[in-house]
Image (cartoon, grey):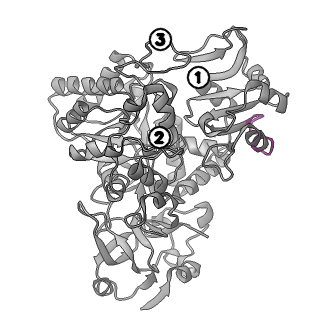
Amino acid sequence: MTTIHRRTFLKSGAAAVGAISSLQLQPARAQSPERSTPATIYTNGQIVTMEGDAPSYVEAVAVQGEKIIFAGSKQGAQAALKEAVIVDLQGRTMLPGFIDAWGHFTLVAEQTLGVNISYFADKPPRNKADIIALLKNTPPFNGWIIGYGYSDPMLTDGSPTLADLDAAFPNTPVMLSNLSSLTGKVNSAGLAKLGITPQTPAVQPGVIVKDPKTGQLTGELLFTPFLTARAVAIGNYSQDILFKSYRAAQTIFAQQGYTTLQTYQLDKAQYGNLRAACDQGVIALDVMGLPSLSDAASTKIIENPDWTWGAYSQSDRGIKIPGFLVSTDAAPQLCLAAMTKPYANAPGFPKGWKGQLLPRAFVEQWIYHAYANDIQLFCYSNGDAGIDLSLSAIRKAVKATGKTGDRRTVIAHSFFARPDQLASYKKHHIGASMMPLHMAQYGDVMRKVLGPARADLESPAASAIKMGLPLMLHNDCPSASPNVMEMIGAAVTRMTFTGHVMGPSERISPYAALVGVTRNAAHNYREERSKGTIAAGKIADLVILDANPLTVAPSKIKDIKVVETLKRGRTVYRRA
């Protein structure tokens, strides 16, 4: 039996599992014996099992092949594995791998084809000039220069206007995607290439924004017109480029400790591409896919003969379609979340604006379909009126079908869930998935558009836990940073980027926050027997951190770094 430090182990041939930096891993079943990961015991660290309602630590974890075979004392681990490499964690913290409860893997992949101009870019832009500089250093893709993730509140002088973009790029089409990924801006060359004029009707729901005084285009496209324009700009590209974007996106998530991903708003073509990528070993992490619906949707679109609901494409790995997504409303920072009371200040919208709901008949149709056909339901509801619509449709479906058990129904983002609504979640076995980073990013904006009292009630995580609800946490990347520790810190401190604390009574403990990205997320996907905690028999999905989020100061949680991420016992990311 050999004892080596973690760093030495990572440099050894025993841990050389292929091109780790690009995550070009082959499916585990296809590996030759000499490339398989050796039996390993991890010890001398702070190993948090995430079992139970309070932090529980073990001295050692024994991993053989893809599974954890023992978690407990070092002596017990050595007895379980007579011949093993012993890895010294050097005091670092080990946790179960993080599970994405709500996200856009395919959109993150697409965005790697452009340039990141968000607050979590390698060199975050501070102003218009910084964004223009980043765009100028970006080669066109399909004839377009595309920047992703700008946010006006995070820029000292706001985002570039049509005039700014035209001055910098008089002939090259340029598109900027907002951090929300729902709206964006296009320069005049881009508008011309898209064929958009002041007379072009906006596909609904959405707006092609015009100057109210002159009637001329401002370059801003909201919702459907923007999403359509983005699809046209990106265009079609080869499988080689697609798979390269998947690898790049997977690296982004593995760097944050994720071992299971999610991608929602999935269409048939994306499913086929993701399945091929998983089958060919391009994607090593597990992927949860949620088909999205539209007014023209039918069961023939969402129910595909290539999948079985809740089953992986490759036995116990690959891509899984656990259920489908039904939306009721949209982003609150854009004043689109449906509220029961008017927004206090909604610039550009009529007086008394309460946001916008999707058609009730549409929502009820698909929620009934999920319950009637025993398909897991994922609702997307933001404002309390949007949540009311989801809950009303669920109650109606329960009454019509008589199906009252725990179906792992979840409502994300649940931003402005009222106490009476949380009680209804409890009654109907509904989990809440919340986005703490939304408060950090947009808390100050929400205080302006809703008023301080209402805004401070966003993401009532502590109330959900007190109600006994399974609480999941998510980043909704790329609508926010993929950084899990930043998300955990936001749930614990509820502090905006400017330092304001949003509703301190809804703060939760670091442990409760970690449960939301491990054990509860696994439960939501019906994977509690294989993922979410460190226990014998579970998959060896693990993450090693350079500090313990349970013991550092709350304000320091966001600064914790991922040292290593392991998927099924194999290293898929290690920090240089």
Residue 544 in the image: state x and y as whole percent.
Answer: 46, 69
Q: Nearer the viewer, mark 3 or mark 1?
A: 3
Question: Is residue 235 visible in this depiction of the protein?
Answer: no
Which of the marked residues, 3 or 2, is nearer the chain's N terminus? Answer: 3
Residue type (three-letter) at the residue carrying disc 1:
Leu
Residue 16 in the image: state x and y as whole percent.
Answer: 57, 75
Residue 571 in the image: state x and y as whole percent.
Answer: 51, 69
Quickly name the residue at label 1.
222
Give the secondary structure at mark 1: strand
Q: Nearer the viewer, mark 1 or mark 2?
A: 2
Quickly name the residue at label 3.
351
Q: Residue at x 50, y 63 (%)?
A: 560
Quickly name the residue at label 2.
438
From this viewpoint, which residue is outermost toward the bottom? 1
Magenta extent: 134-145
Horizontally, residue 151 falls left or right of residue 395, namely right
Residue 397 in the image: state x and y as whole percent.
Answer: 22, 25
Where 165 sits versus 56, above or below? above
Where 101 sits versus 330, above or below? below
Which of the marked residues, 3 or 1, is nearer the chain's N terminus? Answer: 1
Residue type (three-letter) at the residue carrying disc 3:
Lys
Which of the marked residues, 1 or 2, is nearer the chain's N terminus? Answer: 1
Q: Quadrant of residue 84?
A: bottom left
Q: Quadrant of residue 419?
A: top left
